[in-house]
Amino acid sequence: MCSLHSPGGREAQRGGLGRSENGWKASSCPGYLPFMPNLVPPKIPDGERLDFDDIHRKRMEKDLNELQALIEAHFESRKKEEEELISLKDRIEQRRAERAEQQRIRSEREKERQARMAEERARKEEEEARKKAEEEARKKKAFSNMLHFGGYMQKSEKKGGKKQTEREKKKKILSERRKPLNIDHLSEDKLRDKAKELWQTIRDLEAEKFDLQEKFKRQKYEVSHQVLPGLTCPLRAVLSHQLPILNTGWAGYLMEMSQGPGCVRKDLCPPCHRVANT
């Protein structure tokens, strides 16, 4: 009979050992380990009995406590992670709200800037239109005054029948050449262009003045060296002191002098005073 079916066989089944009268011996049942003499079986204290149920219960309690600690640690970690996630979401929402507020402020400032630019543009256009209207009115008034002045001069000339003097001619020419500047509304670039235009006008006037002076010198030289030597002594004396330039020119002046009462040489032919039979 196998030792498993004998009393104490269940204890022998765990260790593979059978208990005999003289002590423990190897079980004759197949599949069990042979007897190992080097291993010393644990000694059970006298008077005490092992309670495997209590040991199992304590082990279960220990495992349960460890599992409970792990669960609590897990929930604590999860709680911290949830709190961090909530804090992160709050920061993200706060940042999104701040960006939206900044965008709104930036948009309002851009609208205000555009409104100011539009207002400034409208003001400049209105100012330019006003100045242009004033300039047109000034030009029309000046043109009207010139027309009235021209009509007045024509009437006065017809009424008086007098010739214009050199001073009046000079005033008339200067009034025709003199132009109003009208530079109050001009910008910096237009002022530069206006200055260049005035500079060119001054150069042209200086060139014209130089040409007229040279022409006057040439005419004076021609009269002094070509006309006067062929005249009589009284007429030469008069022309050497006064050389007026009249509207009729030198030929008309010489004709008047030769036909006047001052000419005593009747045998000479005016105005060159050459001999008549030549």
Image (cartoon, rainbow, N blue to C red):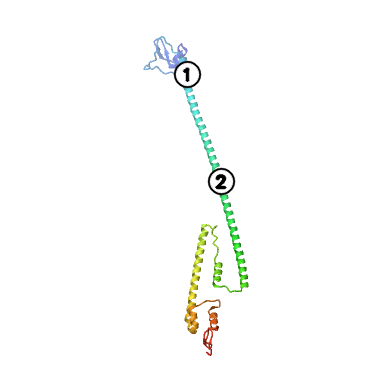
Nearer-the-camera pick, 147 or 153:
153
Q: Residue furthest front?
A: 261
Q: Disc count in the image?
A: 2
* SS assignment at label 1: helix
Nearer-the-camera pick, 154 or 65:
154
Give the numbered dot on residue 178: none
Query: Where is residue 165 shown, x and y percent of the image?
Result: 56, 73
Q: Up-down: is 148 above or below 271? A: above
Q: Amino acid at mark 2?
A: Glu
Query: Where is residue 41 shown, x and y percent of the image?
Result: 39, 15
Give the numbered dot on residue 112: 2
In this orientation, does residue 105 appear?
yes
Residue that appears at 56% across and 67% down: 175
Residue that appears at 51% across and 58% down: 189
Query: Where is residue 224 shown, x and y percent of the image?
Result: 47, 80
Q: Residues within 10 Å of mark 1 (few under 14, many from 20)?
A: few
Query: Where is residue 146 shown, x and y percent of the image?
Result: 60, 66
Nearer-the-camera pick, 253 or 49:
253
Find disc 1 in the rendering and name its residue.
61
In this orientation, does residue 2 appear?
no
Q: Amino acid at mark 1?
A: Glu
* SS assignment at label 2: helix
Q: Residues within 10 Å of mark 2 (few under 14, many from 20)?
A: few
Q: To which quarter of the image does residue 100 belong? A: top right
Q: Up-down: is 33 above or below 95? A: above
Whichever of labels 2 and 1 marks the residue nearer the N terminus, that label is 1
Q: Up-down: is 181 above or below 236? A: above
Discs 2, 1 touching: Cβ within 8 Å: no
